[in-house]
Each structure stands twice: as structure tokens, then as C-alpha cells.
Image (tube, grey):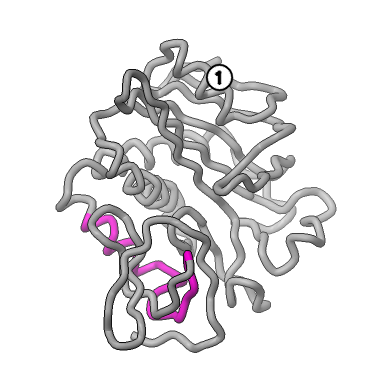
Amino acid sequence: MSSTGGFDIHVVEDVSSSQDEALRRAQAGAPAGTVVWAQAQSAGRGRRGRSWVTHAGSLAFSLVWRGTLVPEKLPRLTLCTAAGVASAFADEDIWIKWPNDLMVPHAQPGVFGPFRKWGGILVEGSFAGGRLDAVIIGVGLNLVPPPGGFDPALSGRAGSLWPQGTRPDDEAVLHAVLNGIAAASVRAGDDEAFAAVGRGLWARSILAGRQVVVDGVHGRARGIGPNGALLVEQDGGQVVPVSAGEVSLAEHPPTT
């Protein structure tokens, strides 16, 4: 365990899920800034119950966050976290897929067009006495590909930030990412500051101007709303905010 930069980092060699372990610690009174850094996970997970595979080239951790954010603004924290993670890699070509995916360009087209997913974010609230007591921010990043490459089932979807053969300093990367999240997360509770985060993310969004299908809503993605919803313009010009759902790209070229 190390404690630097305002974070109390617990290195866990093998755990079912860093998210579950961080939640357990938060419910036992662990302070804000507690980090569970998983070297291996037997049941790592992402949004909507999907599994997340931790491998030798990945970085997986969960952070205990405590603040005064009201529950309806919790989706903002996912987007602020995405902005914070991206800020830690300012020299890289990082893109965002609303609401929680980190993307990089790829030479071959796939499920997400000319992009691959190299990271994901899972934000979960812990409630006590009817109030939001803590938030667990989980982050999984494929820094380099796993030995032997990605599972064929992930073909056209999964990617990594750096190529095989690169060996990043995982601890340095972890601290850079944590610092980025800490700086960005404070903007979640401020309307004007979050609006600026949303504009910045939209400028790097793979959905901008694209025809999408999300939560049964069809239309063109037009932006990020005040509380983090995806704004979808339907035929006829009506703009519908979609607060949650899985976004699929339609086969139409992007427009401005």
C-alpha cells in the first residue's frame, strides 16, 4: 500500500472485482481517495453487467469518491471521469464514445467505425439513509494488447492505447490518471464548469453528427445535455435527451 498525492492506493494481487472491493471498503468507512488497484480480477465488470478482462497489459482500479453531488447529477461524474482520464494522455489521440468508453483510431474499420475501445468507466453510487454516501469510480484501460492478442470475440471492438512491446510505467500512469480524475470530478457539481466539460468531450466524440440508435431512439447525435444526457435529433427536428442506454452507430456518414 502506498499513500501519495492524496490517494491511498491498495495493490490487490487477485480480487473478484476492484469495484466490489472498493465498495466494501467505502461502506466500512474508507475515506475519499481510497484506491483499489487490481492486478488480476476474476469477475471484473463494466456497464450493463458486461465483463471486463484484466490482463498483463491493462490497468484496472476503483476509486472511492465522496462529495456533495445530488443523485440526478451522477451521470455527469462519468463524463468528467472520461475527461480526466483523457487529460492524462494529452499527447495521444483520445476519443470518447458517450457515455463511458475511451476510443483510439484504428486503421481497419470495425464496430465503431475507424475506432477501437481501449478503456471503459463504471460509476456506481452507494447510498446510506436515503442519501448518496459515496461513489465508486471504476476505470479499466488496455494500455497495450494482452499477450497473444485480444480474444477473437472482441474482434473489431477492442484496442489498446499503445502497441505490443511498449512497457509503460503502470504506477506513473495510475497517478497521472488519478490526478486527472481528481481535477475533472470537481466540475460535476457546477453547471457552468460541467457545460465546458461537455463541450470539450463533444469535440472528441466519435458520435458527433452521426446517425445513432440508443434506448429505442433513432436520430442524429447533437451534443451532451446539462446533466450528461446524449442529445439526439430525430426526424422533424425534435431533440430528445437520452440519459442511459447502449449507443449503436447507423450506416450513415457524419455531418456537422
Q: Is residue 55 above or below residue 14?
A: below
Is residue 15 highlighted in magenta?
no
Provide the residue designation for mark 1: 10
Farthest top residue in view: 28
Task: Estimate the x, y position of residue 70 in percent, counting from the top left.
Answer: 25, 36
Amino acid at pointer 1: His
Task: Estimate the x, y position of residue 164 in percent, counting from the top left.
Answer: 73, 55
Q: Residues within 10 Å of mark 1 (few under 14, many from 20)?
A: some
* 104 or 74, nearer to the observer: 74
Farthest left residue in view: 192
Count of numbered circles on the image: 1
The quadrant holding residue 4 is top left
Q: Is residue 50 above or below residue 248?
A: above
Left/right of residue 192 with respect to residue 217 in the rendered view: left
Task: Estimate the x, y position of residue 13 in percent, counting from the top left.
Answer: 70, 23
Residue name at image x 74 percent, y 32 percent: 42
Is residue 200 highlighted in magenta?
yes
Q: Secondary structure at mark 1?
A: strand
Left/right of residue 112 with respect to residue 218 in the rendered view: right
Q: Is residue 48 above or below residue 38?
A: below
Residue name at image x 32 percent, y 18 percent: 129
Task: Estimate the x, y position of residue 186 in percent, counting from the top left.
Answer: 25, 38
- Magenta stretch in the rendered image: 195-215
- Quarter of the image where the N terminus is located: top right
Q: Is residue 162 above or below residue 53?
A: below
Residue name at image x 42 percent, y 27 percent: 126
Farthest right residue in view: 148
- Quarter of the image where the C terminus is located: bottom left
